[in-house]
Structure formats: structure tokens, C-alpha cells
Amino acid sequence: MLVFILSIFKGHVPVARAVLVDMEPKVINQTLSMATRSGRWKYDHRSQFCQKQGSGNNWANGYCVHGPKHKDSIMDLVRKEVEKCDRLSGFFTTMSMAGGTGSGMGTYVTQCLRDAYPNSFLLNQVIWPYGTGEVIVQNYNAILTLSHLYQSSDALLIHENDIVHKICAQLMNIKQISFRDVNKVIAHQLGSVLQPTYSSEGATQYSRSPLGDLMERLVPHPEFKLLGLRNIPQMSETSLAYSTFTWPGLLRHLRQMLIANAKMEEGIDWQVRAPSSGDPVATKLSPHMELRFNTSIANLVVLRGKDVQSAAIEGFKDPALYTSWLTPGDAFSLWKTPRAFNKYEKSATLVSNSQFLLKPLDAIVGKAWNMFASKAYVHHYTKFGNDEEAFLDSFTTLEQVIASYSSL
């Protein structure tokens, strides 16, 4: 399912300015119903597009067949939502990579948005598939999605299903994990960034263009578009009632998560240290893509809660954390607000453009290449118009991305 979120407008019940797209109606109907039942907000029932045929977990079917066939209908829905905006900041799309509709149609519609609105910001929030496998061809769908999005999107905000699942199990103490639990964690993390904040030191007004500010702070070069998100604390409401947090403790943990490339609070490797000045070895990769230290291009820290003005963030300005071609003043940004978020008296979020995705990206490209080398399932894609040359172009694009991030 895709959700193109532009903004919220006022009414008796807030209505999401969004377009929902799926090739099957079931999930969209459930989403509409769930939002309405909450009584807090809802989707516009007219801003949805669905059919009664899926994409068969095939990226080419979604991209080469369903996308062009339904382009006019979908883009007309987007245009109607855009015309309701007093000031269009950009588009935020939510899509999965494992199946056919989210990956294939999502990629096609993203390209259409880029063509129709070339001056608007375009951020894709992408759900990374489970490593154990959701569908047999998920690695093909993933590499085709990522390589094409890299050409049309301004940035890709990645959520890894495996990591979110671990957060549900180990931090939220959920025994029977459902898709709703996973989505709730992701929504919390997104909200921790996209809810209003003061976007600079001394600011007296909330940012009017969070997407624009995000791109300006985190994507200084078009070769580097992969963003990761870490949020602390995250825990069950039962545990929260017996927990207290301090800014020094939260920021110390968040900084070490960045340095050691830890995706969640538990299991942080405290032995990893920032390299000394002039130490080129500290950021080298082993042949197995294991990072000794996670080098950053740019980082954004978002602080919410009580006594936020007292939070000391000097540790994130250490030049050793960043690539040599940006100064910490250009590479680090801070957003903050004294307003607490989602029952947490104090919370901290890190959005990072760094080497965080090198290992999973290298793994997924390797798995897809092994399948392609034996021509496994390739005919399912070529029959919809995605020839072998398109696969090779995708491999080339992503291998260049891996090489660029490895050289930081």
C-alpha cells in the first residue's frame, strides 16, 4: 500500500491529505475503517485508488503494466490534493519493497511525481523486507526498486522489518507480534521526526517546511540519499511508568548507537570508538562488509520534552564522526521542542545519512545477483517488459552506491 502524505487540513475531524493506492481493496478498506473508528482523524474516501487484481509480487507487473495503465487516474487524485494546499512543500510516500504493487507501482508513481512536480521535495519511506524472506523474488523487487528510486527521489528513509520486529519483541515486550504492532513502531518513529519542532537554534517559530529542512540538512550530495532513523526511548507503557530519563543518558546512548551502527538500544557495542584524527583505518570495511565504525555524511538530532534547553549535544559535533568533505557545522543539525511526544517526558531521535545500510544493501544485491546469474525467475520479469539489461543497470547503480558509501 502507498500513502502519499502532503499535509493535514482542519475540520471537525482532521482529514489526512493523502492518496492511498493499492491494486487490491482489502488493505485500503481496513485502513479507512480503522482511521474512522478512532474518532480522532480519517482519510478522505474519495482519495483512494484500488483495483481487484494484484501485481503477483512482481515488480515488473506493477511498474511496466499497472503503473502506465492507471497513471492518469492516480495522478488526477494527487493533483486534487495538491490543489487544496496553500503551500506545497513536497511529497512523502510510504511503500514496501518486497511485493509487486508497493515496489513496482510505488516506483512508477514516484517517477510520475518527479516529472509532474519537479520543484517539490520528494521523500520515499521504504520498508526493507525481512531477511528470512517474505516472497521468493523479494531481492529482485528490492534492487529494482532501490535503483530506480535513486534516480527520481530526493532521499530514501529506510525502515528494516527485522529491526522493527526486534523492537517490538525486545523493547515493547510484545509476545504475538502483528503487522499493526510493527506499523505502530514505525509511525512512532516517523512522528518523532515529522511532528512540529523549532528547526534551528534560537528559532521562535516552528518549521513550515519539514521536508525541505530535512533534505537541506541531510542530503548534501545526490550520490548519498540513504537515511536511517533511530529513536530512544521505546518501551511498553508498563515499563514506561517505572522509568526515568536524563538528557545526558539519552544522548550518550544515541551517540553510541550512531558510532557502532546499532539499530536499537539493546545490544549496543560500547567497545567501538570514534577514530582519532587522521586515522584512516578506523572506517575501513572488512571483506565481509562489517563496519568497524559508522562514518556519517550528515546527522539530525531531534529532541522533545522537559528541560530540552539543557541538553548538551556537543558529542554529535565531533569531526571524527563525519566525512572529511563537510565540517561539523554543515553536517550536524539540531531540532528541538519542549513539548513531550507520545507519553515520553524526554525523547531523542537521530536521522542519519551514514554507512548504516552498507551491510544489508550488499547482502540483498549479492542474493539478487546469485539468482540472476542462474536466471532464476527472470522470465517472470521479462514477460512484462523488464529485460535482462534493466537488471544489469540496477546492479550497476547499486554497486556504485555501495562503493560511494564504502569510501567515506
Image: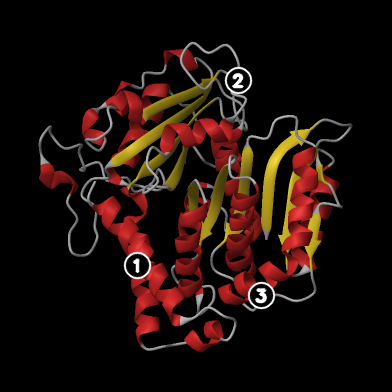
Question: Which residue position holds label 1?
Answer: 396
- Does residue 395 lie above or below 317 as drawn? below
Instruction: Judge from the rendering whether residue 381 lies leftward or rightward of residue 290; answer left or right.
Output: right
In this view of the protein, can residue 260 be seen by the observer?
A: yes
Q: Residue at x 53, y 41 (%)?
A: 235
Please identify the quadrant where the N terminus is shown.
bottom right
Q: Is residue 28 visible?
A: no
Closer to the chain start, of discs 3 and 2, is: 3
Q: Is residue 316 above or below residue 82?
A: above
Upstream in the sequence, badge 3 or badge 1?
3
Residue 98 versus residue 62: which sits nearer the camera? 62
Relative to residue 341, is residue 144 drawn left or right?
left
Please give left or right for residue 359 compared with residue 31 in the image.
left
Q: Residue at the spot x=78%, y=39% of the render? A: 83
Quick one: label 1 or label 2, which is nearer the N terminus? 2
Q: Could you classify mark 3 by the number of other residues whose Cα lies within 10 Å: few (under 14), some (14-19), or many (20 or more)?
A: some
* Residue 101 percent coordinates (x, y): 64, 68
Rendered image quadrant of residue 230: top left
Residue to which mark 3 is pinned: 65
Residue that label 2 marks: 206
**Quadrant hosting residue 238:** top right
Q: Nearer the viewer, residue 270 or 349?
A: 349
